[in-house]
Amino acid sequence: MSSDTIQTASGKDRVIWAWFPVTLLTAIFCCVLWGSASPAIKIAYELFKIGPEDTASRIMLAGARFMIAGVMTILFGSLLARKFLLPKKESWKNVLVLSLVQTVGQYYFFFMALANTSGVRGSIINASGNFIAILFAVYIFHFEKMTLKKFAGCLVGFAGILLILGGGQALMEGGRVTLAGEGAMLAADFFYAASGCLIKIFSRDENPVALSGYQFLIGGVILYAIGSLMGGQLVFYTASCALNLLYMGFISAGAYTLWGVLLKYNPVSRVSILGFVNPVMGVLLSALFLGEGREAFSLTGLLALLLVSAGIVIVNTSEKSIN
């Protein structure tokens, strides 16, 4: 019996990743990793003493993170595949395109946003990528059709985003909406949505873990080089700086690799619906590590989180198509 299988009561072997308790716990672990990204980055700004105005050093930090993430992803993926992962010769162009969209574009804005908004707001707004991705898949890339539940889920999810941005009478105490903060996070979500569709296209002919690993690595090198040319610097004041950077690399490497494994052995809907845990963890961890409990547990914060999480669940349980 393979190490990836378990024996059921009927005596049949079953892949362990398809066993629901394992699927559930692994998905939650991935969401904890992704949810910890916002507080980890904001803590990194403090450890490396990078101010909101220091764009160059912020870009360098993002680059360093994804170079590490790329190496880790390639190693993890190679261990799972029991062979060294290397993209096909014809796939390198796709890897470069993906690196420019998913890593350079998305995380340039993501790191900018977290220097100019709270972790709670950032975590909730970041979930809009799930709904923008639906719109991209339906109306731009034509991968699927719009359905009643997807439409309703997007409306519910975007209602949560509008609420956390200050819609109606619910203006947050955390401050006004800015292009460099909340606006940048929304820009990052557009890049996220586009990259998800590109991965769907490119992974038809290439291992998705290999695509992710090498695009992380190349995108990280590009970001680091840009930040360096702009005059940025990363000063490791304490050992905590190195540990934080390694952890940020592991966030992407561990979560993307394990999520890919779950998608391989489970129906997409079973895995994707668990994505609602992601913004929940982002808010809870921001409250815990950044002292943002007042914002996280305010009526507005909780209602926005509920709407966004409900929207994610709804779009991943859609069935009927609409014209």
Image (cartoon, rainbow, N blue to C red):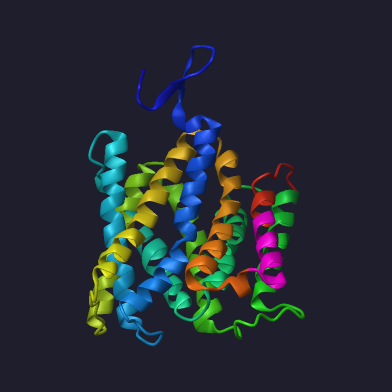
State the residue lying farthest toward the top.
11
Query: Residue placed at 46% from the left, 33% from the top?
Result: 17
The residue under the point 31% across, 81% down is: 56
Classify residue 244 by image quadrant.
bottom left
The residue closer to the viewer here, 21 or 53, is: 21
Q: Is residue 75 visible?
A: yes
Left or right: 114, with 293 as reference point? left
35 left or right of 53 in image = right
In the image, 52 versus 208, the foreground residue is: 52
Quadrant containing the N terminus is top left
Residue shown at the point (53%, 76%) measured from the top left = 118
Q: Which percent across, then down, holds residue 48?
A: 30, 77
| Residue 140 in sight | no
Q: Nearer the viewer, residue 151 or 77?
A: 77
Q: Which residues are magenta?
A: 297-310
Q: Main secondary structure of the magenta part?
A: helix
Q: Is residue 215 above or below residue 86?
A: below
Residue 124, position as x, y percentages in the image: 59, 66
Q: Is residue 49 found left or right of 102 in the rendered image?
A: left
The number of discs equals 0
**Residue 47: x and y, percent?**
33, 75
> Residue 309 magenta-drawn?
yes
Q: Above or below — where is 321 with respect to 107?
A: above
Q: Residue 260 colored magenta?
A: no
